[in-house]
Amino acid sequence: MAEAGLFNIADGILGKIGNLALQEIGLVWGVKEQLEKLKNTVSTIKAVLLDAEHQHAKSHEVRDWLGKLKDAVYDTDDLLDNFSTHVLKRQQGKRGKQVSFLFSKVSQVTYNLKISHQIEAIREKLDAIAADKIKYHFTDRSPISIPLVKVERRQTHSFVRKEDVVGRQGDKDAIMKRLLESNGVDNVSVIPIVGIGGQGKTTLAQLAYNDERTVKHFELRMWVCVSNVFDVKMIVEKILESATSSKYESLEMDSLQTHLRKRIDGRKYLLVLDDMWNDSRERWLNLADLLMNSARGSKIIVTTRAQLVASITGTSQPYLLEGLPEDMSWSLFEKVAFKESKEPNDSRLVAIGKDIVKKCAGNPLVIRTIGGVLYTKDTETEWLSLKERQLSLSCFAYCSLFPKDYEINKQMLISLWIAEGFIQPLQGIQCLEELGDQYFMDLLRRSFFQDVEYDEWGNGCSMVDLDCENISERTHHVSLSAELDSSWKIPTTLLNANKIRTFLLPMQPIHRVVLDKVDHEAIISSFRLMRVLDLHNTGLHILPRIIGKLKHLRYLDLSKNEVIRKLPSSITELLNLQTLKIYSCKRLEQLPRKLSNMISLKHLETGQCIGLTHMPSGIGQLTSLQTLTRFVVGMSSFEMASGGLRELKDLNELRGELMIAKLENLRNVAAECEEANLKEKQHLKVLTLDWSREVNNHVSFEEDEALLEGLQPHSNLQEFHIYGYRAERFPKWMSFDMALLLPNLLEITIWNCIKCIHLPLFSQLPKLKVLRLEVITAVEYIEDSSAESSSSLSFKGNPMNRGREGKEFFPCLEELVFFDLRNLKGWWREAPPVTNDNHGAAASPQRPLQKKESVLSFPCLSKLKIGICTNLAHMPLHPFLEELELKNTPARLLQQSAMVAAGANLVYPLYLSKLKVMHIDGIIDLVSFPEKGIHHLTSLQHLSIENCPDLVCLTEEGLKSLTSLRFFNIRCCEMLKSLFKGFKHLTALEELEIKECRELDLSKDLEENVMELQCLRTLRIGDMPKLSSLPDGLQHVTTLKDLQISSCSNLKTLPEWIGNLTSLQRFEVLDCPQLASFPQTLYSLKALEYLEITSCSKLFDTGQIKKCKNWSMIAHITEIVIDGEKM
C-alpha cells in the first residue's frame, strides 16, 4: 500500500496546477498550455494508480513500472512546488512594494520560458511511462482508503470466536496439515505465516491454536505476542507466563532459561510467536537455542509481515496468506455492514456495497472497518458519500515510520499528513485540519487501528537503523530507529537517497535532554527536497542559515533543544512552512523579526519557551495561524520591535491552547486588551493568563482588574487558568456573569494570587468539572456573603443543595483542589449552622445549634484534595467521593466527614461509601483514627497515613469496616504504639508498609491480629528501633511473596517459623546491624528467588562471605545481593 501515496501526490499535483492556472497572466504567461497538458497526463495516470498498486506485489514488471512512475511523479511535484514558491515570492514582493530585478517583467518572462521547458520535459517523461500502462490492463479504481490515527499496537491473544471468521477454512486446513504432520529430522519445526497488515495472520493462527486436534496433539500450548523490540529475556518471560499462568519477573536470564527448560524439555509443544519483526538471525538463534530440547513434533508458528523474518526463522516454506476471494469478502461485509448480518432488500445499497468491497482488495481489516462505518448509515447518500470520500491509504505506509507502541499526538499526525500532501480538500471542507480530524475521530471510534499498514516492499517508507543499510535511492521517507547524537555521521546510503522528503527521529528521548550536538548542517544541506524535518532534542545550539534553502519544507520540529537562543533570519524564507515546533526551547530569547513573511504558517508551537521576551511585530498578519501556544507580552522598545496584545486582534482562527505570558509588561492596559479581541476567538478551548511570579510582591496592582476585564474570552472556552493575578478582586464579568458568559467552562485554575481576598462565584457554572485554587493566601472564604460576588447566591434541586432559590450548587463538579489557602476558614462567611436532624448533618464545633437548616452538598464530587489549609473549619458535604487527600489540615475536617457519616442521614444513608483512596498527611492534631462514622468505608482500597506525630492508635472499631482495603501505608507517626489490633478484619489486604514509627513494637502484637491476612503479598517494615522480633502471627500468612525489613536496630534474630512462608519470592534485610544469623528453615524456602542484604555486619565477615556459616543457608537462592554486590 505504500504506492497509494502516489494517488495523493497526483491529487496534489492537480490541485497545484489548478491554483497556478488562476494566477495573474504575468506570472504564468507561456506556461498555461504546458500546465494543461501536464494536468491531462497526470489525470490519466491517477485513474489507474490504485489498480497498479494492487497488482505490483504479484508482478516484477508492474513493480518496476511503478518505481519509474513514482520517481517521475515526485519530480513533477517538486517542479510544481518550485513554481508555486516562485509565485508566492513574487506576490510577497509586490505586497511589500519591493519588486527587485528578479521579479521584473523581463526576468519573469525568462523564468516562465525556463519553467515551461522543464514542465514539457517532465510531461514527456510521464507520457512515455504512461504509454506502457496499456499492456498491464489496469482498471480505474476510485479510492476508498483509510487514514491511520493511532499506532499503538494491540496485545494479541489466543482466543477467537470461530463464528466471526469468514473465508479462512482452506488456509486453516493447510496450517493444520503442517502442524499435525510428523517431522523425522528436527525436534522443532517453525511455520511462518506471512501477509500484509490486516490480512488475518493472527486470526489464522488463533484458529489453528484452538482446534480440537491441536489441543489433543500437543502436551503444551503457548501464545506470545512479540513486541517490536526483540528482547529474548522478555519473550522467555512471556512464554513461561503463558505456560504456567504465573509471572516470572525480576529473574535473571539464567534462572529464566532453567525454568523454561523444565517446562518444555521432552514435551511436545506448540508455540505461537505472533507479529514478529526481528530481522536479526543472531537474535533469533539466541531464542531458538532455548526451544530445541523438546519432544519431536513440536511446532512454532511465526506470524509476520516480512519475508525476511520468515526466511530467518522458518524451517519450511512460509505460508503466504492472501486476501479473501470476492465472494468471501462480500460475506464478511454482509456480517459487519448490514443489520441482522444479511443482505438488505435495497438493491442500490447492495450495488454500492459490492463496488466498495471490490476496492478493499480482500483485506479483512479494511472490510471490517468500512463495514463498521457503514453499519450506522442507512441512506444511499451516506453510502455514496463514503464511497467517494478520498481518505488517504498512504497514511498506512507512512505510519511505519513510527515504532510500535509509539503514542502519536493526534494533531502532530494530522500536521504530518498535511505536510506530505496526503490530505486534499474535499467539497464542502476546505480546512485540511478539520478534514484530518474528521478522519481521525471517525475511525478511532471504530477501533480501526488494530494494525498499522507497513510497506513490505521497501521503497516507500523506511524505519532504519543508524547505519541506514536498508535505504535505496528511491526511498522518500526515513525514520531512524535509535537515538541520534554527536557520534552519528550521515551514511553514504542515506546521502545517495537525495530525494528524501521526510526525516523523523521518533526515538529521541522524551524526558532526557540531549546536549551532544548533532551535525545539523550536514542533514539540512544533504536533503533539499524535504517536506518534513525533525531535529527535536538533538543538542541544537545554532540553527544553520542554510535552513532557508529548504523551500519545500512544510513541517519543522526544533522542540526540546534547550540551549538554542536565536533562530536565523533565513528561516523566514520558508514560505511553504506550515508547522514550526519550538516548544521547550527554554533559552530561546526571540523569534525572527520578519516572521510575518511566513505566510503559510498555521502552527507555531511555543509552549514552555520561557526565555522568550516578546513577540515580533507583525505576527498578527499571519491570519492563518491556528496554533500559537504561548504569546509573550514584551516591554515596549524600538530595539525589540515588540508586538503587543493588539497583534492578536485578527488571529481569530486560533484554536486549542493559548497562554498569554508576562502580562505585567502591559502599559496601555485598556486599549490593548480590547484590541486583543479574545471574545471573537471561538475556536480556543484553553486560555491561560500569566503574570510573572517575580513581580508578585506585597503591592496590590488594581490595573490587573481592568486588564482582566478586557480579556473576556469567547463563550466556547472550556479551560481557564489564571496565574499570578495581583489585584484583590476579579472583574465584574467574572464576579456576576461567569455562568452566563462561559457556560461551557469545564476547568478553572487560579494559582499564586496572594493579594486576592474575593473570589468569583464558581458554584453556578453549569458544566464545571474541575476547580483548582492554589496559593491564594489572603482569601478567607470561597463564597463570601459580604462581598458583591455572593449577593445573588442561591441554589435549588437536591434538598441538601437548597438555598433561597435559583441554580444548583456545583451541578457537575468532579474534582476540587485547595492548596495553600492558609487563611481559608470555610466555604462561606456566614456559614449555615450544621444540624443533627434527619438530614444527618453534624453539629459544628464552632457554633451551637440554633435552627434546622440544610447544609450544601456536592452532587458529583469524586476527588477532593486539601493541602496547607490550617484554618479551614468546615466544608460542604461530599457524599460521593472516590478519592480524598488531606495534607496539613486540621483534624476537624476528617472528623466532620466521620460525624456526618455517623448521623442518621436520610438523604445520604451511605455517606462516603464510594471512597476508594484516602491519603492523610501532616495532620498534626490527629490523635486517633475516627472510630465512628467510617463504617461506610466498605469500598476503600488504598489508605495512607503519614506525618501525624500525635497519632497514638488505630482502634479495632475504626478498622473493622475496611474489608476492601488492599494497600495500607503508615509512616512517620512517632507516637503510634498500637497497630495490629483490628487487622484481622482487613481480609483483602495485599500490601502493607509500616515505617518510621519509632514507638511501635510489633513484637508484642497478638498472633490472632495478623493471622487472618490471607491475601497479604507484600510487607515492608522499617525504622522501628523497638522491634526485636517479627510478630508471630506472620507465620500463618503463607501468601506473602515480598518481605522487606529495614533500619530495625534492635532486631537480633529471625524466627524459625519463617520457613512457613512457602510463597516468599523476594526477601530484603537492610541496615539491621544486630542481626547475627539466619534460621535453619530459610533453606526450605524453595520459592525464594531474590535475597538482598545490606549493612548487616554481623551476618558475614568482610571478604569471607561464601565461607561464613550463614552462606550455606542461602546459597541455593537464584539471585543474591550483599552490600550492593551481586554474588
Image: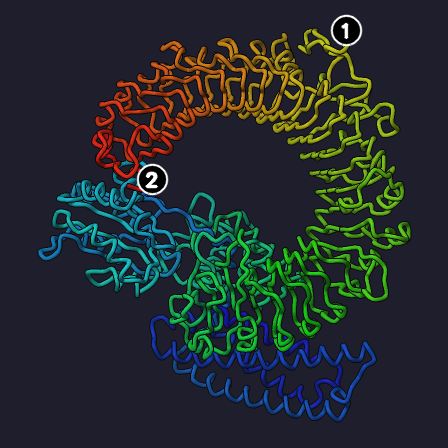
Residue 449 as seen in the image, left or right of residue 83: left
**Quadrant, the C terminus:** top left
Q: Secondary structure at mark 1?
A: loop
Residue 210 appearing in the image: no
Q: Secondary structure at mark 2?
A: loop
Q: Is residue 350 above or below residue 867?
A: below
- Rounded to the nearest angstrom, the CA distance separating label 1 from label 2 is 59 Å
| Residue in the foreground of this view, choosing between 713 and 52 | 713
Q: Position of residue 947 (x, y in %)?
A: 57, 23
Residue at the disc numbered 2: 249
Q: Earlier in the sequence, mark 1 or mark 2?
A: 2
Q: Bin the neighbour count of mark 2 within 10 Å (Cα to Cα): few under 14, some 14-19, many 20 and up.
A: few
| Residue in the foreground of this view, choosing between 731 and 742 | 731
Residue 646, picture quadrant: bottom right
User: Which numbered marker is on residue 848?
Assistant: 1
Residue 840 as seen in the image, left or right of residue 42: right
Q: Bin the neighbour count of mark 1 within 10 Å (Cα to Cα): few under 14, some 14-19, many 20 and up.
A: few
Total marks in image: 2
Residue type (three-letter) at the residue carrying disc 1: Pro
Q: Position of residue 607 (x, y in %)?
A: 67, 54
